[in-house]
Image (tube, rainbow, N blue to C red):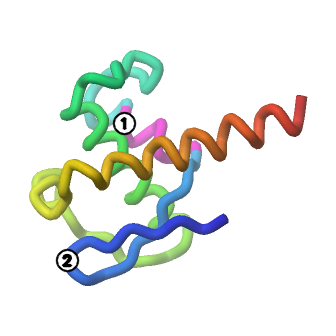
Amino acid sequence: MNKRIIINGAKYPVRMTMGAFLYFKRETGRDVSEIKNTDVADLVTFLWCIVAAASAADKVPFNLSLEEFANALTPDALSILEDVSGNEEGAKKKTE
């Protein structure tokens, strides 16, 4: 399933890649496993990393800074993280 998010009228892919984990580590100096689901700043940062990495993988231009990205989001946009994470968990269960 290919999720998309619309930011400022442009569509970007949203899917988990290993690049997202690297981007988060580079951006914050911390591992994704340290994210608390109540830390909105970390959640927004991780979503930005997911979109940036998926865009890079798909060769979709993505030139939004973290701040530009965050300013364009509404709070309900974070719900896409549940969809992406849920799909990852489902994929892991299928391969076990």
Asked where in the image residue 68 lies, by quadrant, the reply is: bottom left
Magenta span main SS: helix
Decide if residue 95 is on the left or right side of residue 71. right
Q: Which residues are magenta?
A: 18-24
Q: Is residue 16 above or below residue 58?
A: above
Q: Residue furthest bottom?
A: 9
Q: Is residue 73 magenta?
A: no
Image x and y of residue 73, in percent: 19, 58
Instruction: Kindly identify the amino acid type of the residue bearing the numbered disc 1.
Output: Phe
Instruction: Kindly identify the amino acid type of the residue bearing the numbered disc 2.
Output: Asn
**Tally of numbered discs:** 2
Q: Nearer the viewer, mark 1 or mark 2?
A: 2
Residue shown at 18%/56% (left/top)?
74
Image x and y of residue 78, in percent: 33, 47
Q: Which one is in front, 90 or 32?
A: 90
Q: Is residue 82 above or below residue 15?
A: above
Dot 1, how many residues are within 10 Å of its Cα: few (below 14), some (14-19), or many (20+)? Answer: many
Asked where in the image residue 12 lies, by quadrant, the reply is: bottom left
Decide if residue 7 is on the left or right side of residue 95. left
Q: Is residue 21 magenta?
A: yes
Per the image, the residue denoted by label 1 is 24
Q: Residue furthest front?
A: 76
Q: Which mark is residue 9?
A: none
Image x and y of residue 69, in percent: 19, 59
Q: Is residue 95 above or below residue 1?
A: above
Helix, strand or loop at label 2? It is: loop
Q: Which one is in front, 9 or 16?
A: 9
